[in-house]
Image (cartoon, grey):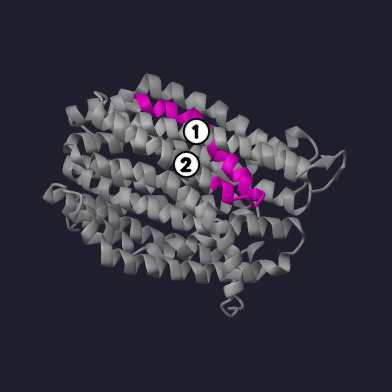
Amino acid sequence: MIQTFQRRDKIKQLLYILLPILVTQLGMFSMNFFDTTMSGQFSPIDLAGVAIGSSLWVPIFTGLSGILLAITPIIAQLVGGKKENEVSYNVVQGTYLSLIMAILIVIIGGLFLNPVLNGMQLEEDVQRIAHDYLVALSLGIIPLFVYNVLRSFIDALGKTRVSMFITLTALPINVLFNYLLIFGKFGFPKLGGVGAGYASATTYWLICGISVYIVMKHLPFSNFKIYRVLFPVSIKKWKEILLIGVPIGLAIFFETSIFAAVTLLMSNFDTATIASHQAALNFASFLYMIPLSISMALTIVVGFEVGAKRYKDAKEYSWIGVTMAVFLAFACGVILLFFRKEIAGIYTTDQQVLELTAHFLLYALFFQLSDAIAAPIQGALRGYKDVNATFIMSLVSYWVIGLPLGYYLANFTEWGAFGYWIGLISGLAAGAICLSGRLIYIQKKKYRFTGENESF
C-alpha cells in the first residue's frame, strides 16, 4: 500500500484492495452456497439437514475466526508505522492461538453436539444428516483456522489478490468433491448432504497448504520470514490479540448467531419452511459478501493510515467505503425485487419450497441497506482498533431488539415464520444507526486533526 493524496487515488487504492477480497469472500461463501444448493438438489431433507448443521457451525466459526481478524489491524498498523521486524512474531503467535482454538472446538463439539441436536425435536433423518455433516466438516477445522491467520497477514499487506488466487484455485476442487460425494459419482459413495461436509474439509486442507507455501516461498511475504523461527508461546502477545480479537469475534457472533437462532427456532415449522427459509437466507448472505468485503478492505486501509498517524485520510477512506456499499445495496435490491423467483429456482425444484423461498426473498431486500451501512463501519472501527463498543451494540441490536421482536411476531401474530425476518430487519437497522454514531464519535472526539498536522 502507498500513501494517497487525492480522493480519486483513495478510491482507486480501495478498489484495488477490495475487488480481490470480494472475489475471495464470494469464493469462500460459494463453498457453503454449493453445499446448500447441491444438497437441495439431492433432496429437501438433505437441504434441511445441511441447513441445521450450518446454522450451528457458522456462528461458532465466524465468531471464533473473528478473534483471529485482530491480526489484520495489528499487522496493518505495524506496516504503516514501519515496524516490519515485528510482523513475523505476531503471525506465529496468532497461529499458535488458532491451533488451540481449533482443538477446543473439536473437543467441545464432541461433547455437546448430540445433546444440542436431541433438544431440537427434528425429524430423525434431518437430525442424522445435520450430525454427520458437522462431524465430516470438523476434519477441516484446524487448517481452516490456520488459514484465517495467514489470510489476515496477506491481506494486511494489501496483497489481497493472493488470497483471491488461493480461493479460486480451491473452489473447483470443492465443487468437484461435492459432486462426487453428494451424488455418488464415479464409484464414490452416495452420501447426500453429508458428502458436502467431507468436500469442505478437504478444501480447507488445500487452501491452508497453499497459503503456508506462499508466505514462506514468495515475495514480498518471504521477506518477513514467517515460520522461519518458531518463537516461544507468549501469553502476553495472546492477550494483546485477544483484547482486540474477542470483541470483534463477539460482535460477529452476535450478528451471525441471531440468524442461526432463528433457523433453530423455526425447527418447529415443517421441513419445507425450514428449507425455504435457509435457501433465502443463504442468498441474502451471498449478497452480504459485498458490504463484508468493503468492511475488510476498510480495516486494512484505515489501519494503515492510523498506523502512519494520517487520521484525516483514515476518515476519508471510511466514508468512501460506506457510500460505495450503499450504492451497491440499491443495485442488489433491484435484483432481489425482480428476479426472486428465478433465484429461488437455483435452490430447489420443489414447488412449495420454491414459492416460500421467493416470498422470504422479499424480506431479504430490506437487509441490504442496513448491512451496507453497518458492515463497512465495523471494518473502519477495527482499523482504528476500536472494537469494544461494537460488540455491545451488536448484542443490544440483535438480541435485545431483533430476536425478541421476531419471536413475538412469529408466535403471537399472523406473520408466522415471516415474523422472524421482520425482527431481523429491525435489529439490523438498529445496529446500523448505533454504529454510525460510534464512528462519528471516534472521528470527531478521539482523532482530531488540524490542517496537515494530525494528532489525537
Q: Secondary structure at mark 1?
A: helix
Q: Residues within 10 Å of mark 1 (few under 14, many from 20)?
A: many
Q: Residue 11 versus residue 367: which sits nearer the camera?
A: 367
Left or right, 233 with reference to 78: left
Q: Residues within 10 Å of mark 2 (few under 14, many from 20)?
A: some
Left or right, 74 with reference to 150: right
Position in image of residue 326 (x %, y %): 56, 28
Residue type beneath disc 2: Val
Q: Earlier in the sequence, mark 2 or mark 1?
A: 2
Query: According to the image, label 1 marks what residue?
Result: 430
Please say if 449 is above or below 306: above
Residue type beneath disc 1: Ala
* Residue drawn at 76 percent across, 58 percent down: 81
Position in image of residue 55 (x %, y %): 32, 48
Query: According to the image, label 2 marks what residue?
Result: 396
* Magenta part, dominant SS: helix
* Residue drawn at 49 percent across, 43 percent down: 394
The boundaries of the magenta stretch are 362-390
Please say if 103 is above or below 361: below
User: What's the mark number on residue 33?
Assistant: none
Q: Quadrant of residue 230?
A: bottom right
* Residue drawn at 45 percent across, 59 percent down: 207
Position in image of residue 108 (x %, y %): 33, 66
Q: Is residue 106 magenta?
A: no
* Residue drawn at 16 percent across, 36 percent down: 270
Disc 2, disc 1: CB below 8 Å? yes
